[in-house]
Amino acid sequence: MTVDSRPLTEHTAHSAWLHDDAFAALGSRRVVVAGDGALTGTVAEEVAAATARFGGAFSRLEVGDGVSDAELVLTLSPPLVEPVETPMVSTGSTGAGTADESFRLTREAGAVVVQAASDAGLLHGLFHVVRLGEAAFDGPDADETHAPATDLRMLDHWDNVDVHPVMGQVERGYSGGSIFYDHGYVHADLSRVERYARLLAAVGINRVAINNVNVHTREARLLTEDLGDVVRVAAVFRRWGIRVHLSVSFASPITLGGLDTSDPLDQDVAHWWVRAAARVWDAIPDFGGFVVKADSEGQPGPFAYGRTHADGANMLAAAVEPYDGLIHWRAFVYDHKQDWRDRSTDRARAAYDHFHPLDGAFSDNVVLQVKYGPLDFQVREPLSPVLAAMPHTRVALELQVTQEYTGQQQHAVYLGPQWSQLLGFRFWDASGGEGGSPTVADLATGRGKAVEDPGTGTWRKPAGGFAAVSNVGDDEFWTGHPFAQANLYAYGRLCWDPALDPGALLDEWAALTFPGTPSAVRDALHTVLDRSWETYEQYTSPLGVGFMVRPGHHYGPDVDGYEYTPWGTYHFADRDGIGVDRTVRTGTGYAGQYPAPWSAVYESPSTCPDELLLFFHHVPYTHVLQSGSTVVQHIYDTHFDGVARVEAMIGAWSEVSTLVDPHVSERVSERLAEQLRSATEWRDQVNTYFFRKSGIPDERGRRIY
């Protein structure tokens, strides 16, 4: 590996998965780029830089003539993928003129041709060749067509224009300040945003929302007097095939327009949004749409006027429809001011209760954005039943790349395995097989058989897509912990193809980020990251109980931290047992929100998966799990095992740390040391808490305080 000995400063940024050496295979060959278009120009710039660096040759043509001696041709061509003639419910527009992003790669005798119907597809084809490296040219003859699973592959930034007095410049951000904003202004120098856009394009992201879903007063003005700055940001992303969106406040007609209401059925309100949308699209013709968090955690919404979420979303959808714009309406709606004494109220039920009755009521250009679990991005939750309960609604699966509840990028936790597991879950099949019922990925992309009649497949579910909270900031390594880059990489690649193997994606990321290093580095990365999600779960909250974090900042253990607060995140531990009864028979009824067979599986503690037992059931500490261990012994064992695993992670990294860039090595070592300190604290606090509650000692006699 070429080690860059220059110190990283606040003005530089780690190359992440676009290290110069990752372009060596492409850059050492004779390459032709043929065709015209803005993104074709971006492709040509990438190729020109790579061939200049590695001694290859580059030619730019308007058409595909004169390419017979080229080793790689990247060229525009007629459409590659014929539309599938399948009867469908209306899916509406994909938004703002989405291009065909597919590409075809052919290889014959070591010569490679990448063809795409659009320059967006050509850009994706370029980065596919970069990922393959020498294998792009050395493999057997091939003819492959690659296309994304969905047109909507989005990242939501929770960046604040002003520094929020509690949340700071980036809410739930663990990587420094914002790459967009600095104390009330958009950065004059957007070169960091340009590098970021390039990274996203390389993994297939095609949309970004650039401000916090909690829209404060200053951020709301991006829609009006600060729109010129959004134009500047959009111009940077446009060069990389990425469309910009804004989070907007439902109360904007009041706070920005001087009206006395935001009632979605008020004509003056609707007209205000029509004029606002016209201004935005006039300034940014390829603008993507609006993201809305309404009636959630204090944000304004239609409930104030006795209206439904469909009323609110559809009013906005009508305003953006002439421009093929989208409304991303978040389903994260629940009572955050409930009485902790009231066991009949269950935060987990809320999204289903609010939105399931509205299925089919949303306009075609509304995308309901649903968190993967019913609570809040916990290390272990069941899949949100809303994903299965909206067969006539465009639903996007929302993930969290920033590690709010999985170590906040202080801990090495690779989330690819978690996301892969979620994407492959089948609501109508508990056998774990490859049956015909749709996966969660199918429900998000519209590619699966119909939910209501999976046997006939006479129509398909409307296509939604994927969205996630970004994990980058102005930290020199983008993500604070260098290994957290792997999460952003895996998210983008799984959006493109949800069937990809997370272990293979880790190999891709490692090869691009640490090119030329010995295989021992790759092996060590697998030792550290392959089971890191499971490891984090082991030393934190057990058996699906969730939370147990310090209120406010959500870092570190606090078993009772949220137990007596209005936020509705309880574990109900007492001297006899632990867990939340969410059964239909005796509890909150949440288990009944799932279709068969999972409703029955979750209803009984004898069939409920161990890892979710305490999410669905209150059981004695002596309850025997399917693993054969009791609940309390499982808690003791996993917390000791989790710390031991972190110690092994540190040992594996220390053996190869001198083989990578010393700046990366130093940061990783610092973060691993903090992970061990934190894991030890988690182990000791959680084990002590349950020993004192239950009075049951560890059968192995280990020290519990």
Image (cartoon, rainbow, N blue to C red):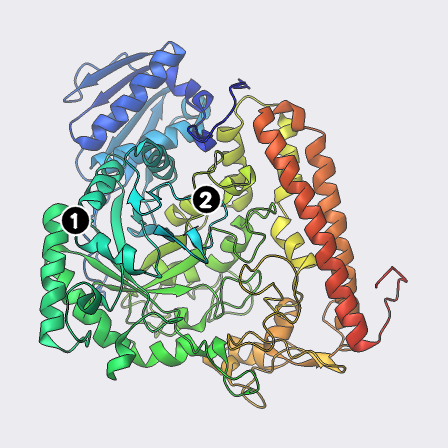
Give the secondary structure at mark 1.
loop
Image x and y of residue 479, in percent: 49, 41
Frontmost residue, 191 versus 308: 191
Q: Residue 674: which disc? A: none
Specify the amino acid type for callout 1: Gly
Whether 104 is drawn above or below 45: the answer is below
Name the residue rendered at 78%, 61% in the picture.
637
Picture quadrant where residue 585 is located: bottom right
Q: Which residue is mark 2?
A: 488
Give the secondary structure at mark 2.
helix
Frontmost residue, 449 versus 474: 474
Q: Callout 2 environment at 10 Å: few (<14), some (14 to 19), or many (20+)?
A: many
Picture quadrant where residue 105 is located: top left
Name the residue rendered at 44%, 73% in the picture.
385
Q: For the C terminus, give its image quadrant.
A: bottom right
Image x and y of residue 111, in percent: 34, 19
Name the residue rendered at 59%, 76% in the picture.
570
Furthest-right residue in view? 701
Q: Residue 97: which disc? A: 1
